[in-house]
Image: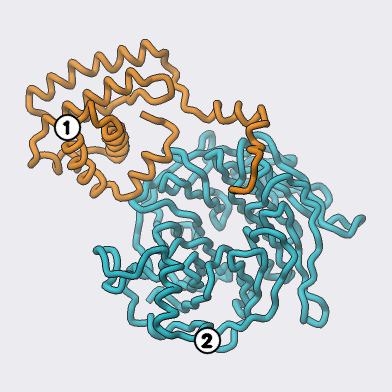
Amino acid sequence: MSILDEFIFPFCVTAHSFNHDRSQVALCPNSNEVQIYGRSGTQWTLLHVLKEHDLLVTSIDWAPRTNRIVTCSQDKNAYVWTLDAAGSEWKPTLVHLRVNRAATQARWSPRENKFAVASGDKCVAICYFGEGNDWWVSKHIKKPIASTVLCVDWHPNNVLLACGGADMKARVFSAFIKGVDEKPAATAWGERLPFSTLCGEFESPSCGWVHSVAFSPDGDSVAFVSHDSSITVATPAADDVDVASVRSHYLPFTTLVWINSQIIVACGHDCSPMVYVRDGASWRLAKKLGENEKSRRSATASPSNSNSAFNLFRQMDSRNQPAKPSSASSAADGSLKSVHQNTITELHHDSSGNSPAEFSTSGLDGRLVLWTVQA
Amino acid sequence: MAHRKLAIDGFDEEHKQIAEQMQYMSTKSDSEIMLMVDQKASAVRAAITRGNSTEALERALAEPPYGRGQEAAQSANALLVAEVLMATRTQDVNGVVGGLSEDDRDVLLKYIYHGLAHPTEFNCGVLLSWHERVVEAGGLGSIVRVMADRKIL
């Protein structure tokens, strides 16, 4: 049984982030709002609506320890939200981002004192709190990024940042901020690295936009998925870099996560999480999660009332196909055999070290699913 | 966005340079590439007459003439690959596809799509049956790779 829980929302979920104990989730329902739901039994109830952005919210990240949420949007802004003392309202603080194009992804650093915002302005903005001005200020990493940055991920040492973009390269930069960071210990990526130093640049065999990038839990490798349906893992060694690529048979992945240093889970346009395990110097597909789990389908919780006509039309919308029986890859009622019925948009790992490891996925079909995978 | 009237990136000089830089550039000159394709031709045809389709295909797929500006070499190479595909017996197709490496399979699919794009010069029926086998082996991912790759044939 790889599924812990499955929830269906009546809208496409384009971004999601859980709080530290999974009792609340912040979602973007494919609009300019962020909705925060709290868990009550098997249902989610809407607690807050964060309305400050003007255009689609592209990314949400909830910092587990400091309990702050950073959101960024196509309206070229990012906000940091803090819960007020009474715990009843989330207040936004504007971030002085200074980008001229949409922001695509925002992630808190491991120590939650900085966050990185990737943008279409061919730069990554590293933001930290400027005590003097009482707002968040940014420093930009620009060279040699040639196109929109689509994804970012922090190294566990709080200084190195991996980013991938539409120029088909994944890069590792140093995002060391004087005054906020202490000098980090030397890592496989280099030592004594001032802000914006390029520590590595990688691309996949057939190129393709890099949709998601992630450092391994120990920080020694970086993995990325790109639009040429491949997963590439790069590990800097003594003089060289070991780059291992796996070509997949499936549609491109949009997101990936390291479960531990031997297992990567990737998901995307093929609607199922795929588990890849390290196999010597390379990686191979171990299994696809969530096929044939029809038995628990009828027990899924849904915040809307079900009636078959409503469901039929909603399913036609979320799956973008008329509901009629079809080929081998779908069941007799036209649905896909996998749990998600449409592209998976985001994947988040619960890094509290539970075993079996847990992660959550959200998709364009409105489903939010919690999975476990044996480590 | 449909309501935008100005294509703002078109005004940015830097943007055009970057788009140019992202094209695949070969280290060889145009004539060297054409020569390479011609040299392959004799070896490939010899392998076809011997009846060894696997070897013929591997030779034809080796060192593809990627890049803009190589259309002549690409057409010549594609026709060569098509010769091999047509000369292979139907019962051997599965075996040949199975014996190819992942790299070669992706390159073969690129040639198949090149052929399908020029239906007057290629036998599309044969190409389609090979397409079916190659996609069975490589999955949808191999088709995505043909479309996404900057190294065009």
Circle 1: residue type = Leu
Residue at left offset 20%, top offset 45%: B133
Taking the spot 92% from the left edge, 55% from the top edge, the residue there is A132
Q: Is residue A157 left or right of residue A215?
A: right
* Viewer-nearest residue: A128 or A364: A364
CA gap, disc 1 to disc 2? 58 Å
Q: Is residue A105 above or below residue A330?
A: above
Look at the numbered disc 1 and give the secondary structure of its residue. Answer: helix
Query: Which structural element holds mark 2?
Result: loop
Q: Is residue A192 visible?
A: no
Identify the residue at the far right of this view: A132
Left of A234 or right of it: where is A72? Answer: right
Q: Which chain is orange?
A: B
Nearest the viewer among A150 and A216 is: A150
Question: Which residue is pictured at 75% across the width and 65% down the height?
Answer: A52
Q: Chain of mark 1?
A: B
Quarter of the image for residue A58 reads: bottom right
Mark 2 belongs to chain: A
Q: Residue A62 location, x and y as percent?
A: 67, 67
Question: Relative to A261, does residue B80 appear above or below in the rendering?
Answer: above
Q: Which residue is mark 1?
A: B85
User: Would you name the residue on which mark 2 appears?
Assistant: A42
Where's the C terminus of chain B, which quadrant?
A: top left
Q: Is residue B110 visible?
A: yes
Percent coordinates x, y for residue A5 in the rendering: 47, 79
Q: Quadrant of residue B54?
A: top left
Q: Are marks 1 and 2 on the same chain?
A: no
Residue A270, numbered label: none
- The spot of residue A230 in percent (x, y) is 42, 47
* Chain shaded cyan: A
Furthest-bottom residue in this view:
A41
